[in-house]
Amino acid sequence: MNVDVKVHAGPGDTVTVLISVDGREAEVTFAGEEITFSAATAGNGEIVLAVPEASAPTAAPAELHVEPADYSAWQEDFSGLLFMGALRGWFDWCGHRVAIRTLTTEEELLVAQLTREYEGGIGGTKAYALAIAGLCTEAIDHQPMPVPLGEHPGVPYKWALERFNYAKRWYPMTIDAIFDAYLRLELRQREVIAMMGKSSAQEDAATPGLSA
C-alpha cells in the first residue's frame, strides 16, 4: 500500500505527522514549510518514507477575487436551494487570469468517479486536485474551457472526463494554484452561508409571534 501526503506549516510552526500504513506507524516532523512525501511498506513490512531533503520555496497564494453572490436567486421559494452556494471568482497567476466556480454535489460525485482508479495509490491526492481544478475552471484568459463535441446534458460524465483529460496537460504547479484557489472559494462559500443563517435567525427573533 502507498500513500501520498502533502502538509503545510506556517512560519514558526512545527508539525508532526503520524503515518499508519498496513498497521505500522511512522512519524515525520518539519517546521515552517510545505512538504510532500510518500509512505509505503517495504518487503519486510517496515514503513519507508520518501521525504525531500529541502522543500522548494513556495510563493504566496494569488489573491482571489470573489464575485458577489446572487442572493435573490438563493432566496427564491423552493428553487432557491438549487442555487444556494453557487459562487464564482477569479485570480491572476503568472500572467494568466483564471475564472473558477464552486461545484455542485453532482459534480463532486463526478470527481469521485474520475479519481476512482487512483484511490489507495500514490497518485490519489494528485488525481483529486486535478479533477477539482479541471471541473471548477470556467475560463482561462477569458477563453472558456473546451466542451466535448455532441455534449448532452443527460451525460455529464462525458463533460467531466473531457475537462479531466484536458487538465492533465497542465503542469503540477498550475493544478496546485487552481486547487488552492478553489479551497479558498469553498471557504468563502461557507462563510457566506453562515452569515445568511445568522441574519435569518436575527430576523426571526425580531418578528413577534413568528413561531407561534
Image (cartoon, rainbow, N blue to C red):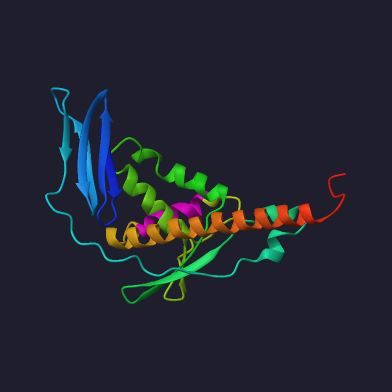
Left or right for 37, reference 152: left
Q: Choose top left, top right, bottom left or bottom right for residue 151.
A: bottom right
Q: Is residue 63 visible?
A: yes
Q: In the picture, which quadrant includes the C terminus?
A: top right
59, 144: nearer the viewer: 59
Residue located at (49% from left, 56% from top):
187
Q: Is residue 163 visible?
A: no
Left or right for 205, reference 31: right
Q: Choose top left, top right, bottom left or bottom right for residue 134.
A: bottom left
Q: Is residue 205 magenta?
A: no
| Magenta stretch prevailing secondary structure | helix
Q: In the picture, which quadrant includes the N terminus?
A: top left
Horizontal and vertical percent for residue 48?
16, 33
204, 38: nearer the viewer: 204
Horizontal and vertical percent for residue 26?
21, 31
Residue located at (31% from left, 60% from top):
169
Residue located at (68% from left, 53% from top):
81
Q: Magenta region: which residues?
A: 157-167
72, 168: nearer the viewer: 72
Compared with residue 5, is residue 89 higher up or lower down, i.e. above or below?
below
Compared with residue 21, is residue 79 higher up or lower down, i.e. above or below?
below
Horizontal and vertical percent for residue 208?
86, 53
Horizontal and vertical percent for residue 152?
58, 56
Residue located at (20% from left, 62% from top):
57
Q: How many marks?
A: 0
Q: Is residue 159 magenta?
A: yes
Left or right for 159, reference 152: left
Compared with residue 134, is residue 210 higher up or lower down, i.e. above or below?
above
